[in-house]
Amino acid sequence: MISICIPVYNFDVTELVDELLRQANHLNYPVEVLIFDDHSQQYFRQQNSLLASRSKTSYLEFDFNIGRSKIRNRLADFAHGDWLLFLDCDVMVDSPDYLKTYIDNLGRAKVLCGGREYGPKPFRPELLLRWKYGVSRECKSAFVRQTDPYSSFISGNFVISADIFNAIRFNEALSGYGHEDTLLGIELKRHNIEILHLDNAARHLGLDPCGEFISKTEQGIVNLVRILNISAGNRREIEKSIKLLRIFRFLRHIGMLYPLRWVFKVLTPYIRRQLCSSNPSIQLFDLYKLSLLSKIYRPHWRQVS
């Protein structure tokens, strides 16, 4: 059996679940769908709770928000399948053979990653930064992703053996938003667990407005530093394997730490204004992330608050 695990927060997953069930009904392979709501707003809970009446589907609501790592682990705890398919709630599968592609490749590796894609350019300018970042940094073919399989791992669309997942799991010490998939990818690499990348994308629908995306990115940068503290014994290897940390380490070594802090202190309002314009610069977004790292950096990456 394959258990489709969908953690939900403030998103209507009705269309996604109905498409997955439609595909499942045409397969000679047992499938279950688990939908766990992480204390969404009432409207979304009302909409998604109707899915409880669908066959092969289980729906559960939490009374408070438990976070991105914990809810994925709880989904795995309740799953009956030998394989777990984790899908973000704000995606859609466009291929009519999406489930079949995964099932046909079960056993070729302990982890299968399908990738991510985006729709056409949005008309609303406040959505352009998230869309542009996704298209330029996240939309990669399986061939490209396979050249660096662990760094290319994302948790929004992947299949994993239940035995492997239960031995590793998402690290619940990482709270807040961002990089729980980075940390899981690091653990997969550390345990020499093979990842096979496939061209079996899920289309990302949840385009955050510019200000919200920048705030989430800031939270993600803090979590990136927390990863270094959680994996202190493997810190140097992590710095080398994550591109942003690798570049930041190089800039530190050539004396650019204080100029980066000046950028954050003085230019942040101007950078944010440009990023929320009708033509956001991804390179400027990279500079902003580096400057944020410089602000929270401490020697030996001591714990950040």
Image (spheres, grey):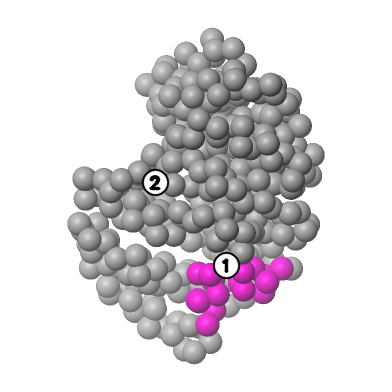
Which span is picked out in magenta? Answer: 234-250
Q: Secondary structure at mark 2?
A: strand
Q: Is 63 or 243 nearer to us in this picture?
A: 243
Compared to 10, does 60 lie above or below?
above
Query: For the residue marked with disc 1, what is the amino acid?
Result: Ile
> Where does the image place residue 163, in percent across and percent down from the top left?
79, 39
Q: Answer whether residue 57 is magenta in the image.
A: no
Is 49 left or right of 42, judged from the image as shown? Answer: right
Could you tell me residue 169's position as x and y percent?
A: 70, 44
Residue 289 makes an appearance in the image: yes
x and y percent of residue 43 in the render? Answer: 37, 21
Relative depth, front residue between 208 and 93: 93
Magenta part, dominant SS: helix
| Crowd tier of the residue under label 2, counting other residues whose Cα lies within 10 Å: few below 14, some 14–19, many 20 or above | many
Dot 1 falls on a residue whose secondary structure is: loop
Taking the spot 47% from the left edge, 13% from the top edge, the residue there is: 50
Judging by the rendered image, the residue that carries numbered circle 1 is 242
Q: Residue at x 76, y 41 (%)?
A: 107
Q: CA distance from mark 2 to mark 1?
A: 23 Å
Eyeballing the image, is 39 above or below 119? above
Choose top left, top right, bottom left or bottom right for residue 257. Answer: bottom left
Q: Position of residue 251 (x, y in %)?
A: 48, 83
Where, quadrant-wise, is the N terminus in this rendering?
top right
Decide if residue 118 is on the left or right side of residue 102.
left
In reply to whether residue 243 is colored magenta, the answer given is yes
Depicted 200 relative to depicted 237: above or below: above
- Residue labelled with disc 2: 118
In the current view of this chain or complex, which residue is farthest to the top?
53
